[in-house]
Amino acid sequence: MKFNIYTLGCKVNTYESQVISDQFKNKGYIEVSTDELADISIINTCTVTNTADRKSMKTIHHAIRQNPNAIIVVCGCFVQNKKDIEIEGVDIVLGNQGKSKIVEYVEQFLACQTKIEDVKDMNHLTFETMTLNNFNKTRAFVKIQDGCNNFCTYCIIPYTRGNVRSKNPKDVLYEVEQLVSNGHKEIVLTGIHTGHYGSEWNHYTFADLLNDLIQIEGLERIRISSIEITELNDRVLEVFAKSPILVDHLHIPLQSGSNTVLKRMNRKYDIQYFINKINQIRDIRPNISITTDVITGFPGETEEEAEETIQTIQMIKFAKLHVFPYSKRDGTAACNLPNHLDNTIKKERARKLLSISKTLEMEYMSKFVGKEVEVLPETTYEEGIIGHTGNYLLVKVKTNDFDLQKKRTVIIESMEYPYCISHETIDCLIEL
């Protein structure tokens, strides 16, 4: 039987979908693209914003139309958040617990032909262990943690992902060792609140995990998908100071550059704390790329507060901004705050921040023109290969060798936003 998977949302969903794919393949099922007819169609949904909700619903309906005779499985945050929603044509409904057993649910449905609904309560859960057999030949995501206890006022995720829970360290290390032995050189650690790994234990922390991971022979890069500024404690930064395996890139959500907005968001830091920590990081890694998330148009955000955010961003000089106009989410505290802004204002502020982001990106990229960098290939284009450096520069390498199994050491010659451009000679090829 043939299956396909639609994946929406974050890197955690991407990882989970790949695990689901591996499990189906291991049982003899054949994966096809979402453009092809399938016997089983799985939609792994997102609910982080209202737009994500609409996209999830649209994707579900598209999958049903595309595969009218298929078993339709819907799972993930959208379903977890909308427990009572009824969608005609869906055969199996799961939330965020049980994704590792989707093959079993499908085979149960094949046997009984009766709709299955299993959306569990997300409180007081243990970590649902998943193991990825293979992602690609250069970079692999490894989910080490799930859930969030922060309850930022704008965010629905603590309600859809549940409490903080961590993967057993032995399972993490074994999974990474297997991926490295299969040719992966970069591991991306991911989770809902990655830096909170181990916070429910007294004996093993995120810093301990990093210390163990850097000992794995053959592992060349560790990237953290995202981490809160408050989680970059001295022990974590000590690992950065001693090991080049941790790449020169951190994604640290700012969300707002105004202290009064941060307070309304229930964030756990103020701007001076954030700046001091960034300075500490740059003392250790002067050329590090620091990217961030910013929410604009939060309820009650004044022109003065919006301007404070711009000033903070320009002072810190991030390498890139991910900008999100505030999206009202039913069930969150921010939903009930006064003075929600008009969409026109939110979009205008977002446009201004995106323009600033492009300027900051180009400033950061320009520092590396004429410099030697190492690129791990991820895909090809008509003139060569495309990949990322450790500090997350996106590089087009013009070459006649399209082999994605070779990393490239090249000199950046120019910029064609959003790419850095280089040419390759035969001397640059290094066997992975």
Image (spheres, rainbow, N blue to C red):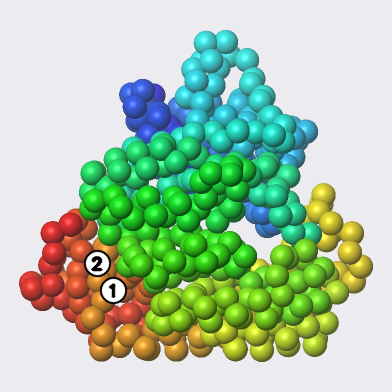
Tell me the crowding category of disc 2: few under 14, some 14 to 19, or many 20 or more residues within 10 angstroms, Cα based. Answer: many
Any part of residue 73 in sight: no
Task: In this rendered view, identify the residue nearer to me: 84 or 157.
Answer: 157
**Does 386 sit above or below residue 422?**
above
Residue sitting at x 63%, y 76% = 274
Question: In the rendered view of the protein, which quadrant contains the C terminus?
Answer: bottom left
**Does 305 sit above or below residue 267?**
below
Indicate left or right for 421 with 340 as reference.
left
The amino acid at mark 1 is: Lys
**Does 251 sit above or below residue 94?**
below
Report if the CB atoms under discs 2 and 1 are less than 8 Å apart. yes
Task: In this rendered view, identify the residue nearer to me: 117 or 271.
Answer: 271
What is the secondary structure assignment of the residue under circle 2?
strand
Q: Residue furthest right?
A: 338
Question: In the rendered view of the protein, which quadrant contains the N terminus?
Answer: top left
Residue tagged by mark 1? 396
Residue tagged by mark 2? 385
Spot occupied by residue 385 in the image (x, y as percentages of width and height): 24, 67
Residue sitting at x 32%, y 67% = 244
**Does 304 sit above or below residue 185?**
below
Spot occupied by residue 111 in the image (x, y as percentages of width and height): 52, 10
